[in-house]
Image: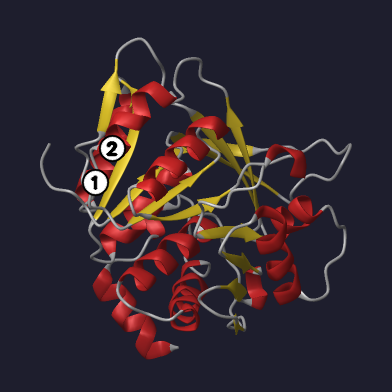
Amino acid sequence: MGHVSKIVCLNGNGIGQYCDVVRIPRKGETAIPKNLRYVQDSGKGVNNAIVIGRLGGDVAYIGKVGKDEGGSLNQSWLESSGVNTEHFWQQEGISTSLGLIILAESGENMIINFDSPGSDITLEEALPHVKACQGAEYFLTGFEVPIDVALECSKTAADMGMKVFINPSPIESAADLPEIPYVDTMCVNEVEARILLEEEEIKDWIDAAKRLCLRYKVKNTIITLGGDGACAFGERGTARVNGIPVQLVDESGAGDAFMAVTVLRLSEGDSTEEALTYANKYCAYLVQKEGREGSIGKYLWKDEMEEVLKKY
């Protein structure tokens, strides 16, 4: 094995298709999609790694894809963004996962992930790569890989001294997530927070972050609040950053970016509030960018971010 990166990502990959609708369909409503197309879009793990790589972070991605067009595109996106792909491979006999992003005229989106048999990385495949990253400082994961893979690899990473950040998404029920005391930080959005706390309405988001820490035994919790900013509670302290008023054009990929940027900034010595503020500015700019060709095409490079910091 060669270079050990400072940050390691293990989560979903794939190839994205977009279609346009007037609005996100409500329960029982039939939508009429238009303009179905392949785009520069992948899963949360690839997105996390690309965001960090483009901002100059030292990051590796663990994952497998099919030996097909989608797999080759994922590899090219990662490598062109400066991501270490030593632990990434294309495999014969499987298809790269497909995700459908439904994009409304308002900029809101809905994501549907389709099952691709054999495409999920197994625990037996993933663990040796995690162990080969001895010396890494941060580990990012989530549930676009099987939950047992995400959690067991998180335990291993924590035992190796890495700070583990987990986004338990997609998740359908609080019962799907056990106590995870080996996790440094759980990152969720408003919807995921409501699911995990089993509450329809939350008025105090910092209190919600505190209760998530207590319920799931994590050291820290970050909750992203869309246009209202983000908050955090935990061992690194309490923080709240307000949203930056902007015109929403396309929110796709913003949640993945917020987590990735926050981890990068923490790895570079920022406080929680400083890291959230930086990520908030990144995403405020990101959601104003046209994303008709996919989230990856919107992700900022370091020189672009320097201009964003001057603006906000």
Q: Quadrant of residue 162?
A: bottom left
Apparent side of residue 209 relative to residue 151 in the rendered image (left or right): right
Q: Amino acid at mark 2?
A: Lys
Q: Give me the residue at 40% from left, 59% from top.
A: 298
Where does label 1 land, which residue?
134
- Other residues around mark 2 within 10 Å, as few (<14) / some (14–19) / many (≥20): some
Q: Is residue 279 above or below residue 117?
A: below
Q: Give me the residue at 36% from left, 58% from top.
A: 51
Q: Is residue 7 above or below residue 311?
A: above
Q: Secondary structure at mark 1?
A: loop
Question: Where is residue 116 drawn, in percent x and y?
Answer: 51, 20
Residue 291 in sight from this viewpoint: yes
Question: Where is residue 9 drawn, in percent x and y?
Answer: 37, 47
The label number, if any, that marks residue 219 in the structure image: none
Q: Is residue 169 above or below residue 247?
A: above
Looking at this view, name the residue that lies furthest to the left.
2
Q: CA distance from mark 1 to mark 2?
A: 6 Å
Apparent side of residue 191 relative to residue 69 in the rendered image (left or right): right
Q: Amino acid at mark 1?
A: Gln
Q: Is residue 8 above or below residue 299?
A: above
Question: Where is residue 251 drawn, in percent x and y?
Answer: 57, 60
Indicate the colouring scheme: secondary structure
Nearest to the observer: residue 89 or residue 131 = 131
Q: Give me the residue at 22% from left, 40% from top.
A: 85
Quadrant including the N terminus: top left
Apparent side of residue 227 relative to residue 160 in the rendered image (left or right): right
Question: Where is residue 173 drawn, in percent x and y?
Answer: 76, 41
Where does label 2 land, which residue?
131
**CB contact under 8 Å: marks 1 and 2:** yes
